[in-house]
Image: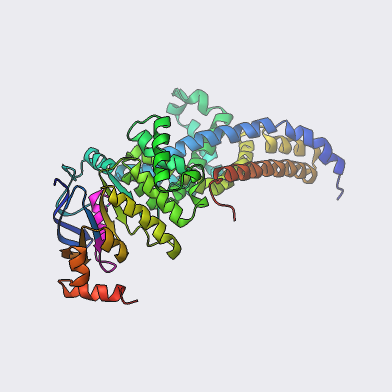
Amino acid sequence: MSFDLSLIATSLPKILQGLGLTLNLLAVSTLFGLILAVGILLMRLSHRSWLVWPAKAYIYFFRGTPLLVQLFVIYHGLPQFGFIRQSVLWPILREPYWCSVIALSLNTAAYVSEILRGGVLGVDKGFVEAGKALGLSKFQRTTRITAPLAVRLALPAYSNEIVSMLKSTALASTVTLMEMTGVARTIVADTFAPYEIFIAATIIYLVLVWIIQTGFTLIETYANRHVRKT
Amino acid sequence: MADIIVLEKMNKFYGTYHALKDVNLTIAKGEKVVVCGPSGSGKSTMIRCINRLEEHDGGRIVVGGQELTDDEKKIDLVRREVGMVFQSFNLFPHMTVLENLTLAPRLVRKMATAEAEAIAMKYLSRVRIPDQAHKYPSQLSGGQQQRVAIARALCMNPEVMLFDEPTSALDPEMISEVLDVMTDLAREGMTMVCVTHEMGFARSVADRIVFMDQGEIVEVSTPAEFFAAPKSERARTFLGQILAH
């Protein structure tokens, strides 16, 4: 078996043509996922069982099934129903891009809501009591005390989830999207050199993960500037 | 004198555990009351009921003329007139000292930032740490943090101050700096309810001492009576234990 280093070099710029779509999927899904996660979190933390149970069921379903299966159900499964094809949602659901964004967003929302819940539960009850004792309303306690402290506690786990999301965007290649992995697979089909091409893709993913990690380290350092350095 | 806190036949349960049993206590404006007793006697639970950090299960609590019920609006009204200092300080760790002090005046009293900061600096001077205004709580010693916590409560200009074992988490050398601030406050006429084991403070500052054991108020006396001749056997035992050393 021959190994062609130059093939890695020549395929890198081609794979980078998929970088924009990879980052687009990551950013859009992360944003939608976060918004959804906050909603699910509020349901999950409410004391009304008719809100808690749907949230629990949602989390159980999306954490309990493979993302690839969720993507296939949305992309291949839903169009089998005539009413879906006739609905106003069809212009969205027939697009592989939007199917990917929907699957990624729904999936990450389940994880992120649990990450944030962990943060909320980690906030010392004493700080909330101090807020109560000062006469702050529930909304003020939530926005000024619980939320900022919970976010700080959740940051390390959240950065983990973003890294995980970056890698999950590769699944979009299975529904024809030409993000980085999609481009790489196309080149492999042309060159029959999976080793070199996927190594090139690996290098790009590792650089992206490094950027994400470093970014979160900076954010964590800034967010925890109030903690005494010893 | 007007009664600012009235507890009438107050009961509190944790599950089947009867934490407070028919507690009756009336505190007048300007009075300084020290609550003492063995651990698990219900002292903290009782003062935490006064600003409804705990809900009582029976009887009545009236604070500043407002009866505490499930009515959230009334609870907030009571809380803004009742300052509280906790054993573990509970300063908001992500805010500077100044932000800790101005948060509630700005949000609850709708005060302008400049005015809230002026008041905050006034109270920081009163507790003798104006130079720490821009530090974070974690950069202060325990004694300094507790003085900030007292200043934070005072910034709301409360009618009553509740102290829940304010010196129990402090290193011994920092206890007096906190007690000095509390003594100043008492001299200025603040109504105070203090759960504490600092018997020296109780003797010099308290108008009345409330001794609790097993969820009951066992006796209420003046410090002179309480330390010289406690009425109950349980109080004698308690004093024997904490004054032994």
Q: Residue at x 54, y 27 (%)?
A: A94
Front-lying residue, B34 or B222: B222
Q: Is residue A40 visible?
A: no
Q: Residue at x 23, y 57 (%)?
A: B33
Residue B137 within the magenta-colored segment of the rendering: no
**Total labels drawn:** 0
Using the rendered view, name the quadrant where residue A203 is placed.
top right
Name the residue at 61% across, 43% down: A216
- Residue B30 in percent (x, y) is at 21, 48
When the figure is inspected, residue B162 is found, relative to residue A134, above or below; the finding is below
Q: Position of residue B39 (x, y in %)?
A: 29, 67
Tell me, yes or no, whether the highlighted magenta stretch contains residue B43. yes
Residue B180 visible, this angle: yes
Q: Which residues are magenta?
A: B35-53
Q: Position of residue B86 (x, y in %)?
A: 35, 54
Whether residue B39 sits left or right of residue B176 in the image: it is left
- As drawn, is B22 to the left or to the right of A154? left
Give percent across and percent down for residue B13. Answer: 21, 60
Answer with the quarter of the image where residue B78 lies.
top left
Residue occupying the point 46% across, 50% down:
A118
Left or right: where A166 falls relative to A200: left
Residue B30, placed above or below residue A98? below
Horizontal side of B34 relative to A126 (left or right) equals left
Quadrant placement of the C terminus of chain B: bottom left
Q: How is the image coloured?
A: rainbow
Displayed quadrant of residue B157: top left
Query: B98 or B90, which is in the foreground?
Result: B98
